[in-house]
Image: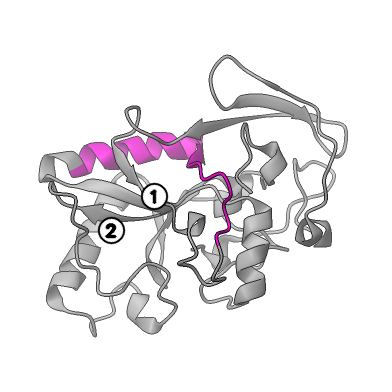
Amino acid sequence: MTCSRCASTVNSSTSLLVATATEQAAPEQSKARTVGAVTGCWRRVGDAGMVRSMDIVEIAPPGFDVEIALAYATAANITGLPIYRNPRCWLHRTAAQHLQRAIALAAPLGLRLRIFDALRPTEAQWKLWNADPNPDFLADPRRGSPHSRGVAVDLTLVDDEGHALDMGTPFDDFTPLAHHANTDVGIEAQRNRLLLLGVMTAAGWDFYRNEWWHYQLFDARRFPLIADADLPQGMM
């Protein structure tokens, strides 16, 4: 889901978004923005009157040879309800470039990536946190999640027939069995986790020790938080 150790408070005088109690209420905000010719390129006036520019890229075939299976678009998550009304898979452009590297590394092995979650608006982070405020597996939305910055991805590997490799636990298994290097899962699952770890770290991603499925960019807090209204097309 997300890495709590890399969450951080964003300076309210310069940030695009501020992780405060107003995010929990998720009020409608008036925002000025223009959408560029390239999908996901946009600019808006920030809370302090500064103009910030971001690049949000949609992750979808054929541009990205991945399988999209957004878990929070279904009721099969810790809230018991769908979180994403309009499921779209987005990443910051920098993260998207690293994802392409991972795709290229997996392909010669006959493997593809299945994505469970990517950019997660701050409103969605609040829904998850309210359902299970467990800092071992969820970032406190008041501090901010790498997912809500568009620079984290939850994923697994699938073979050339579309079958997910055995990773020992399902996605979002909030138990110690989900930890990297847990030797209580089977040998095949340990091997597959290491294979995913190798692909992702070779592509320039950092990992979170408590979740075999979670990867994020290094220094994630340098990216601003993103609310649903800030996306080219909202998800919530």
Q: Is residue 235 above or below residue 71?
A: above
Read off the residue under disc 2.
197
Amino acid type of the residue tagged 1 in the rendering: Trp
Percent x, y of residue 24: 77, 62
Q: Secondary structure at mark 2?
A: helix
30 in the magenta segment? no
Percent x, y of residue 99: 36, 40
- Say if mark 2 contacts mark 1, CB within 8 Å: no
Percent x, y of residue 203: 31, 43
Q: Residue furthest bottom?
A: 184
Q: Is residue 187 above or below residue 15?
A: below
In the picture, measured across the screen, residue 83 lies left or right of residue 180, that is right
In the picture, measured across the screen, residue 42 lies left or right of residue 197, that is right
Crowding at dot 1, Cα within 10 Å, few <14 / some 14-19 / many 20+, comes out as many
Q: Earlier in the sequence, mark 2 or mark 1?
A: 2
Q: Nearer the viewer, residue 230 or 85?
A: 85
Read off the residue under disc 1.
205
